[in-house]
Amino acid sequence: MITGRRGAALRHRLCELSIRHVVQGSQSKGEAFEALLEELELAADHVAMLGDDLPDLPILRACGYPMAVGDAAAEVRAVARFTTVRPGGHGAVREAIEHLLREQRRWDEALELFD
């Protein structure tokens, strides 16, 4: 996760979700993205990104699968290959993850985790 925000509540929530790779308070999301790619030894075209506003555009343009939340800025939706129905903060991330799993034909595999 790369965010311009900082705070204990955010750290707590990301910890609850077991999100390990977090860049908070980012002034340049594009630079943070490049650094994270290098650290994780990933190619940009192997990454999906869910964005909502203009600072997300550098990553969305560079990644392999750009996505936007339903209430994203028009410029963000214009570069997205998938846009959620739900707005940010109201289930959009879950919707995007389900979309990715279905595209990879792994949704049934994910469901099996809850049997």
Image (spheres, rainbow, N blue to C red):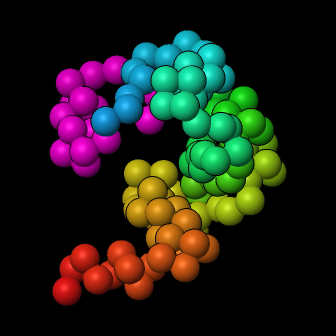
Is residue 8 placed above or below 84 in the rendered structure? above
Quarter of the image that includes the N terminus: top left
Closest to the observer: 4 or 37? Answer: 37
Residue range corresponding to the magenta coloring: 1-19
Q: Using the image, determine if residue 71 lies above or below residue 107.
A: above
- Residue, x 28% and y 32% (percent of image)? 10
Q: Residue 14 colored magenta? A: yes
- From what the image shows, is residue 16 above or below residue 67? above
The residue located at (43%, 16%) in the rendering is 25
Q: Is residue 16 left or right of residue 83?
A: left
| Residue 16 % position (x, y) | 19, 45
Please state which of residues 93 and 111 is positioned toward the viewer in this rendering.
111
Q: Foreground: 23 or 7?
A: 23
The answer to whether residue 49 is visible is yes
Task: Indicate the position of residue 17 as horizontal and vertical percent values.
Answer: 25, 48
Residue 47 position, x and y percent, is: 60, 46
Quadrant in which residue 73 is drawn = top right
Q: Does the magenta stretch include residue 9?
A: yes
Residue depicted at 49% across the width and 23% down the height? 39
Residue 54 shows in the view: no
Image point 38% across, 29% down: which residue?
A: 22
Quadrant position of the C terminus in the picture? bottom left
**What is the count of numbered marks?**
0
- Looking at this rendering, what residue extends furthest in the front direction? 41
Image position, residue 27 (x, y; %): 55, 13
**87 relative position to 25: left or right:** right
